[in-house]
Amino acid sequence: YVGAAAGCHRLLSFDMGGTSTDVALLDGPIIGEADRTPRFGQSRTEKNSNEAPDAEFQFEFQLTTEGRIGPYPVGVPMVDMHTIGAGGGSIARVDAGGLLQVGPESAGADPGPACYGRGGTAPTVTDANLVLGRLRSDAFLGGDMALDEAAAREAVQRIATSLGLELEAAAQGIIDIANEHMARALRVMSVQRGVDPKVLTLVSFGGAGGLHVCALAEALGMSKALVPIHAGVLSALGMLVAPRARFHSLTFNQLVPDELVDNDFDAGSESKVADDATVSKQSMLNTMQQKLEQEFEVLATRGRQALREEGVSVDAMQLRASVDCRYRGQSYTINIPWQGITETVALYHERHAKLYGHRLQQAVELVTLRTKVQSKASIVKFHASDGATQTPLSPASKTNAKTNAKTNATTNTPSKTDEQDVDTALPVFTRDDVKENIDGPALVTEKVSTTYLASGWRCEQDRSGSLFLSKISVL
């Protein structure tokens, strides 16, 4: 939703909260453009060219039927996510071998990190960020909650003493290890899905995400990142805009003979004689497709009926049909948007090659038919940044803004930035202050999140209030 508002269509998201990080890939349709999905009984060439493509097909999360909740497999469709135990509350420790470890144990929200002042004493990722000056002790939750910097430094100092390091070096080590855990998760959802992360935009949300977004983008060779407005509570916003939907499925188990979808097969080709055998193949293909579309319509009718009972009008409903496909003899399937037998099988071959690096010369089996009927997404108008709840800096220009921000940042703990060996106070901006480009290192604060803009990165605010980060060359 925020990606569409910012004009970014190929996204890799990570939601970093207090206990875990959830990673997902949003890469538009699985293969091809939005208008490759026709209505039932309608070929791609027959689709009305004046129809606007459905947002459903432009921005579709990958779903999986092989998800897990804890140790238990879950066979219902769910967003294809990868979750790891790395968050702001992840606890740092030195193991028996003298190595620094971070997570998966977490301090949670209560007692939380040591800096919360609620009795927690274990050093966490949040404590390390505070020690490095990447959090403002007086601006957490818009100033409604003061952070105990002394408690954070004391907690991280125990790690530093165990490892024989300076305090800031230990804090940076905690951050580096947490970042590596998250970078590994991001690679699982991009590289291991056959997608080059360099062509994606990294979307960071959750209360802690903005503090790590630049480092994670650099770890994956990405040059663009997006920090949405209200990033700390974006999941709540997602619940408001998410459409109501009904999923239905039917086991089909139909083998599609190779000769029916052979690319060389063309009943109208001048190089072939349209004999009885050719006509028979075309008839078989038409009969199979008719049967499939009838079954799809039965499933779709169930979904429409369920939404009508919730007060959703038929005109406000959108339909997506797909098929779980596999090569004959395989035990795993890949879900492919339904686009007629011939094109669906061709897309399956492409998708299999993209995921696994090869395709087989075998017949394809249509295992399960699936439909998703949903209402249209709700439209939410973003208000101006909530930075107005903090002391505005009101910069007259980019130069003045940095001067004012540095003055405002003097209460911050001086920090060692990524490329510097000297202590320096980071310039601090509220989100409202980002009216022109800002170059890192700097902090951008709002009530529910803080973004650390690393050296070599530039930040600007789009019309929806999201922060767009881009990698720049450093001379």
Image (spheres, rainbow, N blue to C red):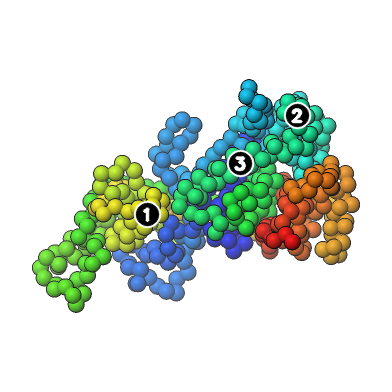
For label 1, the residue is 353
Q: Is residue 55 left or right of residue 286?
A: right
Question: How many neighbours does mark 1 have within 10 angstroms: few (below 14), some (14-19), or many (20 or more)?
Answer: some
Residue 193 appears left or right of 213: left
- Position of the C terminus, as image quadrant, is bottom right
Residue mark closest to the camera, 2 vs 3: 2
Cα–Cα span, label 2 and label 3: 22 Å
Q: In the rendered view, would you say 5 is above or below 212?
A: below
Residue 361 placement (x, y as % from top left): 26, 54
Q: Earlier in the sequence, mark 2 or mark 3?
A: 2
Question: Where does label 3 land, which residue?
Answer: 180
Q: Are marks 2 and 3 in contact (CB under 8 Å)?
A: no
Q: Could you tell me which residue is drawn at 74 percent across and 53 percent down?
A: 455
Label at residue 164: 2
Q: Is residue 1 visible?
A: no
Residues 283 and 85: in front is 85
Please identify the quadrant where the N terminus is shown: bottom right
Q: Position of residue 337 (x, y in %)?
A: 38, 56
Q: Label 2 neighbourhood size at 10 Å, few (<14), some (14-19), many (20+)?
A: few
> Which image quarter: residue 432?
bottom right
Alpha-carbon neighbours of circle 3 within 10 Å: few (<14), some, or many (≥20)?
some
| Amino acid identity at mark 3 | Glu
Give the x, y percent position of residue 127: 74, 35
Label 2: which secondary element: loop
